[in-house]
Amino acid sequence: MNDLKGKKDQVVGKVKEDAGKAVNNDETELKGKVQHASGKIKAKLSDVKEKTAEKINKVLDK
């Protein structure tokens, strides 16, 4: 679920960033960059969490 939130933030952030560039609004562009980066981090953390859970389950199943 967090992976979807992360991907959504990446897309929305990129749209905001591009919109800020298009209208020459540095604040909107910066907010978009921050949201995009936040989305990448959320997606990566979700991936790490999933892989960690898989490894723990493999150890516990032995």
Image: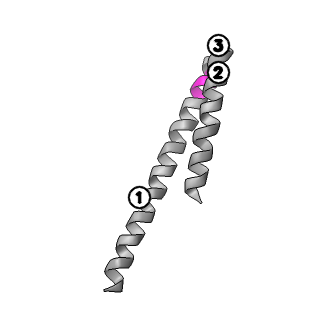
Residue 30 among magenta residues: yes
**Figure coloring:** one colour
Dot 3: within a 10 Å radius of its alpha carbon, few (fewer than 14), some, or many (20 or more) residues?
few
Reading the image, the residue beneath label 2 is 20
Residue type at mark 2 is: Gly
**Residue type beneath disc 1:** Val
Residues at marks 3 and 1, CA–CA distance in whole angstroms: 37 Å
Displayed quadrant of residue 3: bottom right
**Is label 2 in a helix, a strand or a loop?**
helix
Q: Is residue 4 visible?
A: yes
The span picked out in magenta is 27-31
Q: Secondary structure at mark 1?
A: helix
- Report the quarter where the N terminus lies: bottom right
Q: Name the residue located 57 percent from the left edge and 40 percent from the top edge.
A: 10
Three-letter amino acid code at disc 3?
A: Asn
In-image side of 57 versus 21 (left or right): left
Q: In which quadrant will I find the C terminus?
A: bottom left
Q: Residue at x 65, y 37 (%)?
A: 12
Label 2 Cα neighbours within 10 Å, binned few <14 / some 14-19 / many ≥20: some
